[in-house]
Amino acid sequence: MKKFTLLDGLVAPLDRANVDTDAIIPKQFLKSIKRSGFGPNAFDEWRYLDHGEPGMDNSKRPLNPEFVLNQARYQGAQILLARENFGCGSSREHAPWALEDFGFCVIIAPSYADIFFNNCFKNGVLPIKLDADKVDALFKAVVAAPGYKLQIDLERQRITSPDGTVYAFDVDGHRKHCLLNGLDDIGLTLEHVSDIKSYEAKHLAAQPWL
Amino acid sequence: MSTKTLYDKLWDSHVVRQEADGTALIYIDRQLVHEVTSPQAFEGLKLAKRKPWRIASMLAVPDHNVPTANRAAGITDPISRLQVETLDANCTEYGITEFKMGDIRQGVVHVMGPEQGATLPGMTVVCGDSHTSTHGAFAALAHGIGTSEVEHVMATQCLVAKKSKSMLVKVDGKLHKGVTAKDIALAVIGKIGTAGGTGYAIEFGGEAIRALSMEGRMTLCNMAIEAGARAGMIAADDVTFTYLKGRPYAPQGAQWDQAVTYWRTLHSDADAKFDATIVLDAAQIKPQVTWGTSPEMVVDIDGYVPDPAKLSDAGKRGDMERALSYMGLQANTAITDIKIDKVFIGSCTNGRIEDMRAAATVAKGKKVAANVMLAMVVPGSGLVKLQAEQEGLDKIFIAAGFEWRDPGCSMCLAMNDDRLSAGERCASTSNRNFEGRQGQGGRTHLVSPEMAAAAAIAGHFIDVSKL
């Protein structure tokens, strides 16, 4: 996993609650056996006017001009501003894979579904929880100012807006450490092989039917 | 001695080690595997030159991509076929038990696991699938994980996790006739919302839960994720043990007795403390029908499509207007006036033998309404299909005009050929009514198997409890 460094990124607003993982990456694209290449199909049903299937040349498909991420001013956005319960539904890790491949490194929302939230950290995507009123203020600011950027400082756990307003955010210590250093969880866990083996021996002796 | 919830007991008994900040390594007893969320995990394992830690803990089955008709022709979509073949190849390479497409034991992973006795009380169960919460019905700690975590469990037999908060959903009293576990699930989600359980592990308890069969308990825990909770669970009791006894992966002989002795401790202590408690009266629950694009958008069968004009919050009004527009519904329409085009009975929520029986009871001697262009019944596994056929349920369905299919996830998420076309309206026993879930532009109404069968016969929603 790549290291998460200081980010100064363009913000795109996705103003709807309960955005589910079926919307983020529709099921027909889950047939891929790869981890990459999902970006062109992120939000497929909202983004294009036709029906998408794997293998299509997405650059030739008709874009939905109404969909916010298709607007010229949000091209190249790296920060997705969203509403509550973002990423609800299926556990598909294809959702953060698609967002990351699309170009997003940070999501800011009042709340997330648990599995999606967890999956983001495994893929170098930082999901930030911010109070709903602060998110609301950011939505207004983004819409009002084309080219609106935010600076995300994970090390110091702060978001800085163009007018100098600073928003502090919380992040789990272990996850922060892994993101900052680009660490693989499996490698860390395997440092505890002897603990796992001794637990396993006792556990299976006590419950031999397992 | 401190009192514990069931969740406390399951968590505490699986902690391998815990850091000062609460981050823990949790040992995983059972990993279920399907074709959609595993290929990248196997690939990661190979790239890192690792092997699965405990192959005996794994059980695999293809379910999302499999066809439910004309199986002899195989999977015609080459991309779907490659995904299933990739699972087959990975399982062969590592010696993982897999029930392949032609195997009578093949089925939806969350139907297959319990049916085989592969889900046992006291276990931790994971799968790269959010509906893994289903297995909590056996007093197991079970939840969905992402593909990175699938690889992590394969490589280490552990998961990195922090303990959730605990919530008790207590359903007192008795359900009326025609009201099911599905209706409890939808009523709970309607009450607490799809994010109401976020950050919690939910235990379902109370008289109405104790009275549920294992099938009903699985339906309820299955939809804990739709309330935002990764895990749902129910205490073990004689209903649990009776269901499990004699199943292929369940303990036998002296080990069975030893196991049951332990399993009887798997309940919350009488005065255990929960972080949140929700109480419902079973007698107040009516058959439920969703009207919108989120499972929390649900009403009683004798209710009406809600009116956004009555909402003061602009954000919520916008969400409701958007949902009604997608669903093609007018505010204040009686639910029983909503006509349907298709019916889907099946899925990890409602694809078990009891669901088949319930739907067949409603369909017996009747005919699917002329305006319903397709009513399909998809058993949750080959064994469910076989059992249903031995009971003659297939003949009841076919005589009534339903299609009787082969087992798989099917139109719950429409990864195979079973899907809605744009604008089609479906009475579905599945778990998600999101935009596009059953096919782009498709309109899903979540209901119980009884309600779906009744809607197929009537051509519109109808109160099955009044039939």
Image (cartoon, coloured by chain):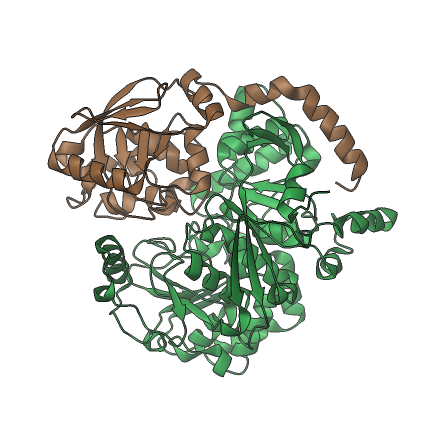
Chain letter for green? B
Position of residue A47 relative to residue A120, above or below, is below
Residue A68 figure quarter: top left
Q: Residue at x 31, y 70 (%)?
A: B305
Q: Position of residue A53 (x, y in %)?
A: 32, 44
**Front in this rendered view, residue A41 or B156:** B156
Q: Position of residue A194 (x, y in %)?
A: 70, 20
The answer, for residue B74, to whether it is visible in the render is yes
Q: Position of residue B352 (x, y in %)?
A: 59, 61
In the drawing, does residue B281 fall left or right of residue B318? Answer: right
Chain letter for brown? A
Which residue is most to the right? B254
Residue B348 figure quarter: bottom right
Q: Residue at x 48, y 78 (%)?
A: B464
Q: Position of residue B197 (x, y in %)?
A: 47, 50
**Front in this rendered view, residue A38 or A90:** A90
Position of residue B72 relative to residue A56, above or below, is below
